[in-house]
Structure formats: C-alpha cells, structure tokens
Image (spheres, helix red, strand yellow):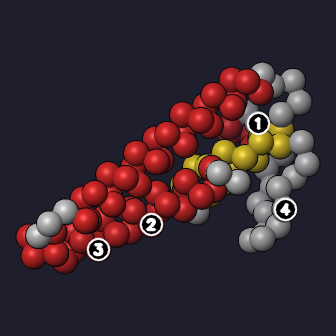
Amino acid sequence: MSRMALIGEVKVLAEGEHAPKGTLRSVVNADCLIFVEVSGVDLSAEIAKLKKKVVTAERMVKAYEDKIGAPGYEERVPASVREMNSQKLEAAQIELKELHK
C-alpha cells in the first residue's frame, strides 16, 4: 500500500494505542484516523486545515440535529431515513470529538 501511495511506512495501530510521537492527527471518518509525521511540515497550514474541518463537522452536527429536531419529523420522515440520519449524526459527532482531541 505504501508503494502505491508514494508514502513512507504504513502502520495500523491497535484500538486504544497512543498516537506516534511527532505526528499530527487527521480524521478521515468515524472509523479511520491518520497520523502524519510533521517534521519539515508547515504546521500553520495544517492547523488551518484542521480548523476548517472542525467548522465543517460542527455545521454537519447542527444540520442533522436541526433536521431530527424539526416539528413533525418522527411522523413525516420514513423510519429508514430517520435511521440513516441518526447514523450520520452519530458519525459527525464522533468526527467532531476526534478533531477536538
């Protein structure tokens, strides 16, 4: 995999294992985090990217909370759509939580 992506070493961490030292965390989705070595990297640009991701995740959480909390939502929206929206809200909340770590 690392040859295909033209990157260095790829290591899968066990759940609960600490982030490698000298890395910056990036959230891919609720199930996947990437730790990138930061030596020689412009950290101000990376911090700006992370702040943008936080704003996007906050907007996503608010949008789903507003949608789910709308009057008549339970009665008007099919169960399958309500379930999908609940899953999307949960995934967005997890992403936001990871971004704040």
Q: Who comes first in sequence, dot 3 or dot 1?
A: 1
Looking at the image, residue 80 lies above or below residue 12? below
Residue 52 location, x and y as percent?
54, 34
Residue 49 location, x and y as percent?
61, 31
User: Which residue extends farthest left?
Assistant: 76
Q: Who comes first in sequence, dot 1 or dot 4?
A: 1
Q: Who comes first in sequence, dot 4 or dot 3?
A: 4
Q: From where the camera sits, is residue 93 visible? A: yes
Helix, strand or loop at mark 3: helix
User: Pointers 3 and 2 in contact (CB under 8 A)?
Assistant: no
Q: From where the camera sits, is residue 77 visible? A: no
Residue wearing tag 4: 18
Q: Which mark is residue 40?
A: none
Q: Who comes first in sequence, dot 3 or dot 2?
A: 3
User: Pointers 1 and 4 in contact (CB under 8 A)?
Assistant: no
Q: Report the residue at 38% width, 62% height from top.
A: 88
Residue wearing tag 3: 83
In the rendered structure, the answer to whether residue 21 lies left or right of residue 90 reads right
Q: Report the residue at 10% width, 76% height from top.
A: 75
CA gap, disc 3 and disc 1:
38 Å
Residue wearing tag 1: 7
In the rendered structure, the answer to whether residue 63 lies left or right of residue 96 reads left
Helix, strand or loop at mark 4: loop
User: Which residue extends farthest front?
Assistant: 71
- Tell me the amino acid under the disc marked 3: Glu
- Nearer the camera: disc 1 or disc 4: 4
